[in-house]
Image (cartoon, rainbow, N blue to C red):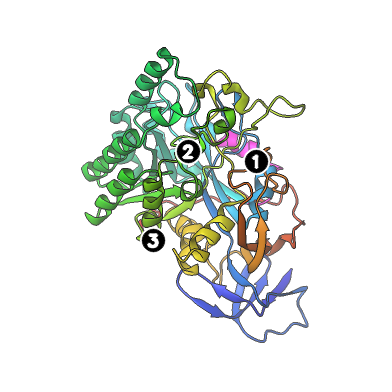
Amino acid sequence: MKSIIKNGKIVTAGETFEADILIEEGVITNLGKDFDESSVDEVIDAAGLLVMPGGIDPHTHLDMPFGGTMSSDDFFTGHKAAAFGGTTFHIDFALQSKGSTMVEAIQTWKKKAEGKAAIDYSFHVALTDPVDSSVEEIPELLKEGVSSLKIFMAYKNVFQVDDSTFLKALKKSAENGMTTMVHAENGDAIALITEELLAEGKTAMGYHNVAHSAAIEAEATNRAVAFVEMTNAPLYIVHIACKDGLEAVRRGRKKGLPVMGETCIQYTYLTDAAIDTKDFEGAKYICSPPPKGDEDRDAVWDAIRDDTVQTVATDHCPFWFDGTKEGRTPGKELGKEGWHKVPNGVPGIEDRLPVLWHLGVNGGKISPNRFVELASTNAAKVFGLYPKKGSVSIGADADLMLFDPEKEHTISAETHHMNVDYNCYEGMKVKGWPKQVLVRGKTLVKDGEWLGEEGYGNFTPRKNFNEII
């Protein structure tokens, strides 16, 4: 298959220029002008469009067991939704089970994706069984094509590991050229405060914000950065939502420490007020860490602008608001008796790029080139995919988004493709929407029509010695 994309304006993380793109067998083989069209199978006219690397979402949870249920998007519905929103690659989390190995977790998640995947993908793996054999197993992950490891400082008695295991894992990962990731909330403090709140009968949704306060997130983030100072091991802190946590990362980076930060698209828009409702509606927005106050939201944008955070992800982990209907898995209604029973997670894999463009680029907060960095290129660099993914360059996979900066769209659960019955951005009118989305040269979405197929997506093994940016 040979194709040409012509007349578009190419936007990369570093430059903006006009050129045509020659694609052969799914790979970009040339950039230039006036290519011979007589021998190609397809010519795509991108006049008036921006041609950018497809989005890379480095933080998702598809088909994940949690809180007595499963996240509602599997590897087909999640991938289809991702493609409609311009995302062509994602990295999901394989979760180790108590008594099993991390390699077994990766193999389990590979089976979940097999035959369903529609875009390309990879995995991080979470170390959740804090025994020495888990730490010693870390080098084996590379044989599975996985070069990033996640540690939880939260979810006591479920995922949380102690500081000793965290430090050992940091060192072992660094020795093998791997990147450690961390969910930074103080799980012991959350468990204690939760117990106290429930003893007082405080079960309304807003108390989730009390148990997951900015102070609890900031303490863990500061501790995680201190561990980097002790070990000089690369660390990527996921889904940072609060001002003081971001400040901890900023201080660490100013010291020259190999610490990197991720925020999520929901924190650029939502605040804790979305959760703190008198009725059950707030359950829709319960996630950990939750969005914080207006000042914290402003701090997220400051961190996006000044490179304190390197990526904007989703932490896409959808649950039905009403999972009682036929054909649905149990959802947020599991928490009717109290906030502590609500499955933690929000949807967003389809909305990330349009919302970031609208609030960020249209809002004058970031440039189109910074948008590409945050949405694609930086994730590719941090997680061992660049320049195969996340770039518009010769030799790169033709994972491309043809973006119409003038197209207006109203985000709604009625029209989205995520397998969930609500949307965090319901009613938001955005300007800028993907017109055509390609993965390895194959068009998956064009003019709102799905042209992709189950099983097209490939697992992409990743290299060690990822970049620290």
Q: Is residue 76 visible?
A: no
- Quarter where residue 46 is shown: bottom right
Quadrant of the rendering where the N terminus is positioned: bottom right
- Quarter where residue 215 is shown: top left
Marks 2, 1: nearer the viewer: 2
Q: Residue at x 59, y 42 (%)?
A: 347
Marks 3, 1: nearer the viewer: 3
Q: Is residue 46 found left or right of 262 in the rendered image?
A: right
**The magenta segment:** 106-119
Pick whichever of labels 2 and 3 is earlier in the sequence.
Answer: 2
Q: CA distance from mark 2 to mark 1?
A: 36 Å
Q: Which residue is mark 3?
A: 305
Toward the viewer: 128 or 314? 314
Residue type of the residue flagged with mark 1: Ala
Q: Which mark is residue 113?
A: 1
Give neighbour class at mark 3: few <14, some 14-19, many 20+ (Cα, 10 Å): some
Pick whichever of labels 3 and 1 is earlier in the sequence.
Answer: 1
Q: Are marks 2 and 1 in contact (CB under 8 Å)?
A: no
Give neighbour class at mark 2: few <14, some 14-19, many 20+ (Cα, 10 Å): some
Q: Secondary structure at mark 3?
A: helix
Give neighbour class at mark 1: few <14, some 14-19, many 20+ (Cα, 10 Å): many
Quadrant of the rendering where the C terminus is positioned: bottom left
Marks 2, 3: nearer the viewer: 2
Provide residue 137's location: percent of width, then percent of height: 41, 34
Q: Secondary structure at mark 1?
A: helix
Q: CA distance from mark 3 to mark 1?
A: 35 Å
Q: Which residue is mark 2?
A: 273
Q: CA distance from mark 2 to mark 3?
A: 24 Å
